[in-house]
Image (spheres, rainbow, N blue to C red):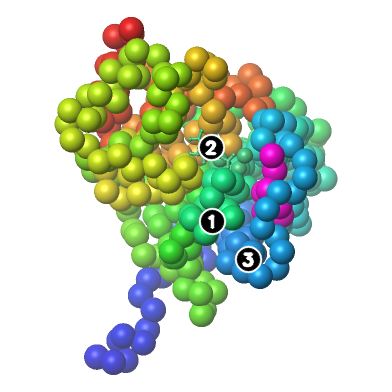
Amino acid sequence: MSEKLSLPIGTTLSRFIRERQEQFTYASGELSQLLRDISVAAKVVNREVNRAGLTNILGKHGAQNVQGEEQQKLDVIANNLFIKSLSNGGEVCAIISEEDENITDTQNPHGKYVIAMDPLDGSSNIDVNVSIGTIFSIYRRQSPVGSPVQESDIFQKGTEQVGAGYTLYGSSTMLVYTTGHGVNGFTLEPSLGEFLLSHPDMKIPTKGKIFSINEGSAVDFGQAVKNYVSDCKKNKFKGRYIGSLVADFHRNLLKGGIYVYPSTKSAPNGKLRLLYECNALAFIAEQAGGKSSNGIQRTLEIEPTELHQRCPLYIGSKEMVERAESFIMAGE
Ligand code: AHG
Ligand code: MN
Ligand code: MN
Ligand code: MN
């Protein structure tokens, strides 16, 4: 009995990736290696996040990113760590990031994959010890291997993702990912430094009782969104909003719920970024049996035309997203 308790439960992430490799469309091992590189970078970012209060890396970096947001030191640190790790790995030819205005050429012309990432999601929560995360999408390049990276490699619809995931630096650190064969969640065992399978084959309940929206912006909402929020209240749903998309999404994935970042008067396309935030979570939501849309169109089918393109987001339990869509489609 005691022997059982001292053993960690769960397969290690590396073993899981290796055993699932044959499911990949291109089972050459590079995607497996890429996923392992991401998990190592995530562990390094996790270490920095955990001791941030002790190492003078809290607070503002002193510059704005292309989104017009004040960058935090950890935004920049996480961005650099992921870019370095993915560039060294060799499987990735280009990286696009919320924190970088332009495409990063990793100088690996033979890399077969492109990464889109939000290196640190939930910046406003960094300094107050509230959950934050990293979000990533993996695409296969369209142009021939060995040639310069083309726009067609970058501007791919979410349906073209070959993998997507997030890490959550929360009360425990988790990595959740999909390669299109369901969703699996791994918890970091800190004393071993290993991600262990803790949430196999994750499924989101088809309906739930949680709605997550920043009601502080309600005066800016259109009438349809206001009507939907009233509907949630009439149904006595619980309002839960952390302000870190990845953490709000994760909770709703486990418990059932909907996360909404709507279009507003001042931001008609909402705030969240299609390529760095919405597509990855939409892929995971769908793979878990949930749904994601901009209110009228499936997120994964939105045509990207700009690197930092934004879109409204309605994501989570299938029946809840469909109900929200019925309000948006009905209009004012
Ligand atoms: P990021 O920190 O990567 O810029 O993302 C912030 C996003 C998201 O995490 C969160 O849900 C949302 O911004 C919160 O925005 P509001 O403060 O407008 O609610
Ligand atoms: Mn930001
Ligand atoms: Mn974000
Ligand atoms: Mn971010």
Q: Residue furthest left?
A: 235
Residue range of the region highlighted in magenta in the rendering: 70-77
Q: Is mark 1 within 8 Å of ligand 1?
A: no
Residue type at the position of mark 3? Gly
The answer to whether residue 24 shows anywhere in this view is no
Mark number displayed over residue 53: 3
The front one of 178 and 223 is 223
Q: Position of residue 115 (x, y in %)?
A: 64, 42
Q: Is mark 2 within 8 Å of ligand 3?
A: yes
Q: Are marks 3 and 2 in contact (CB under 8 Å)?
A: no
Q: What is the CA distance from the residue labelled 3 to the residue labelled 2?
A: 26 Å
Residue displayed at 48% across by 63% down = 173
Mark 1 vs mark 3, CA separation in Å: 10 Å
Residue under numbered circle 2:
277
- Whole-percent x, y for residue 307 in the image: 67, 27
- Location of residue 181 in the rendering, given as x and y in whole percent from the top left corner: 39, 46
Above or below: residue 162 compared with residue 154: below
Q: Is residue 85 magenta?
A: no
- Name the quadrant containing residue 39: bottom right
Majority secondary structure in the magenta region:
helix
Residue 287 % position (x, y): 37, 41
How many neighbours does mark 3 have within 10 angstroms: few (below 14), some (14-19), or many (20 or more)?
A: some
Q: Residue at x 72, y 36 (%)?
A: 65
What is the C-alpha distance between the residues marked 2 and 1? 22 Å
Label 3 CB sits under 8 Å from any ligand 1 atom: no
Which tag is nearer the camera, tag 2 or tag 1?
Answer: 1
In the drawing, does residue 218 fall left or right of residue 79?
left
The disc at residue 128 is 1
Tag 1 secondary structure: helix
